[in-house]
Image: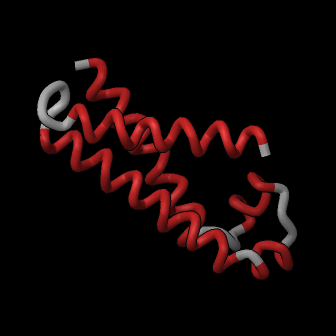
Amino acid sequence: MIGFWLVALVTAIHVAIVLAEMVFWETPRVRRAFGMSAELAASTRVMAANQGLYNGFLVAGLVWAMVAGLPGEGAPVAHFILACVLVAGLFGAAT
């Protein structure tokens, strides 16, 4: 049961990331969080939306896993998506 709630937490975090990158990228709050000027936010809007779309795919995979059942049939999907999240996080931290 704790696994389900941890997956739900990661899902919620990624929903927030999707919203920040696809909807609220140029708002003062998101610009402040990423230390961006209005000009930089405007010039990177399309790139951020693309990143948001990829994060949306992670959300979709995690929701799929939860609906399929955790623990249970959704576990392999959750493991794969969480491994993708881990690799992306490590790459982001390294670069």
Depth order, front residue of 30/21: 21
Position of residue 83 relative to residue 30, above or below, is above
Position of residue 34 relative to residue 46, above or below, is above
Count the numbered circles shown: 0
Colour mapping used in the image: secondary structure
- Residue 75 in the image: state x and y as whole percent: 23, 32
Please tell me which residue is depicted at 68% across the width and 77% down the height of the picture. 45
Depth order, front residue of 84/11: 84
- Residue 37 in the image: state x and y as whole percent: 87, 69
- Residue 71 in the image: state x and y as whole percent: 18, 25
- Picture quarter with the N terminus: top left
Please tell me which residue is depicted at 60% across the width and 68% down the height of the picture. 24
Left or right: 63 as drawn, with respect to 36: left
**What is the quadrant of residue 5 in the picture?**
top left
Please tell me which residue is depicted at 40% across the width and 35% down the height of the picture. 9
**What is the quadrant of residue 2 in the picture?**
top left
- Residue 93 in the image: state x and y as whole percent: 73, 39
Depth order, front residue of 12/60: 60
Please tell me which residue is depicted at 23% across the width and 42% down the height of the picture. 65
Depth order, front residue of 33/67: 67
Left or right: 66 as drawn, with respect to 47: left
Position of residue 15 relative to residue 77, above or below, is below
